Amino acid sequence: MKCKLLLSATLVSASLMASAQQQNTAYAITGKTDNKYFWADIKQIDVSTGKVVKTLFEADKTKFTTSFINKTDASIKVNPTAYGVAACAFDARHNRLYFAPMHFSDIYYLDLSSRDANFTVVKKSIIPTTSTSNYQTEENHITRMVFGADGYGYALTNDAKHLIRFTTDKNPVVEDLGQVTDAAENAISFHDKLSAWGGDMVADAFGKLVVVTARHNVFTIDVNNKTAAFTGTITGLPEYYTTNGAVVDNDGNLVVSTANVYDGLYTVNINDLKAVKIESTEKTFNASDLANNKFLSQKKYDDAKAGILPGGCIVDSKLSKVFPNPVLGTTFNVSFINQKEGAYNVLFTDLSGKLIQSVRVIVGKGDQTKTIALNKKPLKGFYFVKVTDANKKLIVSEKIIAN
């Protein structure tokens, strides 16, 4: 297949410069030097070196103010991180660090644009308490949080029976989507306390959520059907190193931290889940959670969006057309213009390339249009329609929208 030049030299140069300037930073909830189990300080770190760039909040030192979206909560005067924090997420759009304090099913955020430590209570008691006290039981602790590619914030309890989704607008909507269930093929249950509790959550560019549990296991959550698929176990980490924080670095891999020991950071290759220690001369810290605004599979998503195939090639789709676009129901049309007679396969896939449906069509002489009927109406979002000939050569690849 003949490849086409996709970017001018000027655009390539600008892209490289922007990439070079992109900081490899994250936010971390850290313990104290004299109490590693009190995860209450908020710091900005460089994930490539383990260096603390800035300390934003120290629970026992920094003066702070707290405001309340719901004025009925205004009687609460407690330090927002006084009970520890095990879940946080960075909202790049508003420059806020959202988090959930341990022992409570609450959501707060720290305004990172402010020079002072200004906190806002978004929602109190999202999950009803079952104990006589106001404290949540261990299974209901929110220990994973991230902002997805869809712009929503997501938070997850230890036992995965509460997947919480929230918005960031002036009048935020916070809803409990309910339980995340196991995919049928799971070798390890997403609800198993020893294998699947704790840890952290990142997002990929295709809209999935990826959970790294405290015991090094990795699950991928499909938000649409609320199922978690076990995808593997991280290797190369010390047994004592629980994986409590996770973010994506500039290379598209995971960086993980531990809450229980001062043992620095590890990078994890997302393809084979092998961990390598990030060597550093900086003073080590422990972190119960990490957060930044990078997504897994970002390059793959960008290539798919641009119609770029593996190897850097792009399909010439000038001779064919998919319509209507957006697709409003369960059918769409594919025009075959100046194509040879014979059999063709029309592939309907998601943006990651996962096949949803394949339809075989026979094309005769002359220009023709074939109507493709889907088995069911697709969920709203972006998809690809690809057409291959009898030799499995790709001749069409067009991105469509389902409404």
Image (cartoon, rainbow, N blue to C red):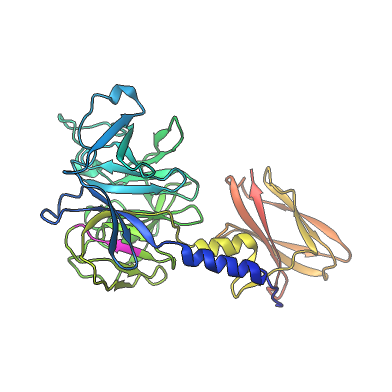
Look at the magenta stretch and give its main secondary structure: strand
Residue 402 % position (x, y): 64, 47
Residue drawn at x 28%, y 65% is 50
Out of 366 and 252, give the one closest to the viewer.
Answer: 252
User: Picture quarter containing residue 60?
Assistant: top left
The residues colored magenta run 255-259
Viewer-nearest residue: 400 or 31:
31
Residue, x 58% and y 66% (percent of image)? Answer: 14
Q: Say whether residue 160 is magenta.
A: no
Is any atom of residue 82 visible in this view? Answer: yes
Magenta run includes residue 258: yes
- Residue occupying image coordinates x 24% and y 72%: 281
Query: Does 8 sit above or below residue 357?
Result: below
Rendering coords of residue 39 (x, y %):
20, 50
**Residue 163, how many percent across, how many down?**
36, 43
Q: Is residue 163 above or below residue 22?
A: above
**Residue found farthest to the left:** 34
Q: Quadrant of the C terminus?
A: top right
Name the image quarter holding residue 343: bottom right
| Side (left or right) of 154 relative to 342 | left
Horizontal placement of 375 versus 241: left or right?
A: right
The answer, for residue 186, to whether it is visible in the render is no
Up/down of 153 relative to 262, above or below: above
